[in-house]
Amino acid sequence: MADIKQYPLNSSFVTNAFFDSDIILFVENEYDPFLNNYLTRNQDLISSQFELEGKTFVYFPAIQFAEGSVQKSILDFIRYQLPVLYSLSDKELEQLVNSSRAHNTPSVFYRMLIDELQLSFEKACLLFKDTENNLVATPIEYKSETDLDAFFKFFVKDLGYEDFKYVLGVGTRWEYDADLLFDEETNQFSEEVKCKIDALKKANKYEVLVDTIMLMLSTLKEERPDIIEKIQPLLTKERLLEPKVAPSPLVIDKHYNIFLPDFGNKEIKLHALPKTVYLLFLRHPEGIRFKELYQYKAELLEIYNKVTNRYEKQEIERAINDLVDMTNPSINQKCTRIREAFRSIMGDHIAKYYYIDGKNGEAKRIMLPQELIEFK
């Protein structure tokens, strides 16, 4: 093996990753025909070995699509990662994917990635993030196919531990406490939503395609102006290290329906009580501490009476009393439903702007800037 080297990398990469911690990405500086032939023939085997370790192996040439129909699951994943693409029909999104594909040969993609991340290496590498969120590159060194067999067997087993990598850059509860359990419980999604998110995550090898579509959009302006016009907000992204997409405004109409106009006017559907909680927090961008939620009981009743057709006064008051009682799980359940509503249609990198969140003991709030919230 050649000497292990360390390469500098912009530290912002750690927080704005091009791929998440489950991805193992092959990248090369120059085309290696022997290595690519090996990967093409053995990709299924290598991928299955990584899957046993909970990882996804991304070999870019294998996710290049033939012209024509694109699988619905891929379109769903692309929209999930870039919800502004809900503005496009399936046919329009297919055309965008195919146009991007035509511009993104493997050599163009690798050069774009190497230049963007300011990498400099001679040998092909596997890029991934370690347990400390550092970007790691493991050079693929070989003299024969037997060496490659051994490399991938060793790598999958040890996932590139220290002797084989270089790093790039930098008690008992006696009473229920809704604030204390907020993080734990609001991440426990329903089985239906969990299955949907899990299915989308299995397609995360296509995230590199999503990002290359983003980078190539400017080249498609003249080619497909009709499509580009519908997704103008995406054109503000120019580099991989910047956020993937700006949040859409959030519009609440006179009937208290909630819409995301920049994301295909997607409606966020919530039942009366979760919607009541959400509207309360939208009214209070400064945030609300759960232990002080009881002070907002009258406002919760006012909102609830506006968003529901129920007239059972005692049941309504009981429901609101449960919401403001920190020894009752009701407020966490409603926050979970709110988080689910957004996470079921978009990745957390963008959904986090919309749901209620906050640290234990601190005010919970919605991150979306106030100027993007409109009550009609």
Image (cartoon, grey):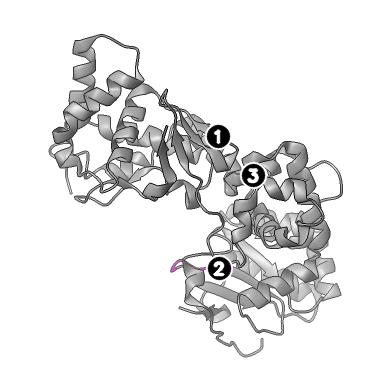
Look at the image and say whether residue 332 sits in the magenta stretch. Answer: no
Asked if labels 1 and 3 touch by Cβ distance under 8 angstroms, the answer is no
| Percent position of residue 88, x then y | 69, 40
Q: Is residue 133 above or below residue 187?
A: below
Give me the residue at 79% from left, 61% from top: 61
**Which residue carries the number 1 mark?**
266
**Which residue carries the number 2 mark?**
241
Give me the residue at 33% from left, 39% from top: 282
User: Which mark sits nearer the N-terminus, 3 or 1?
Assistant: 3
Q: Closer to the observer: label 3 or label 2?
A: 3
| Percent position of residue 50, x then y | 63, 58
Between the residue at mark 3 and the residue at mark 2, the CA separation in whole angstroms equals 20 Å
| Amino acid type, callout 2 | Leu
- Within 10 Å of disc 1 (Cα), the crowding (few <14, some 14-19, many 20+) is some
User: In the shown orientation, is residue 316 left or right of residue 174?
Assistant: right
Q: Nearer the viewer, residue 205 or 253?
A: 253
* Residue at the far top in the pictured view: 312
Label 3, secondary structure: give it. Answer: helix
| Amino acid type, callout 1 | Lys
| Percent position of residue 94, x then y | 77, 44
Q: Quadrant of residue 166?
A: bottom right
Q: Quadrant of residue 376?
A: top left
The residue segment tinted magenta is 128-132
Label 1, secondary structure: give it. Answer: strand
User: Which mark sits nearer the N-terminus, 3 or 2?
Assistant: 3
| Amino acid type, callout 3 | Leu
**Which residue carries the number 3 mark?**
85
User: Which mark sits nearer the N-terminus, 2 or 1?
Assistant: 2
Between the residue at mark 2 and the residue at mark 1, the CA separation in whole angstroms equals 27 Å
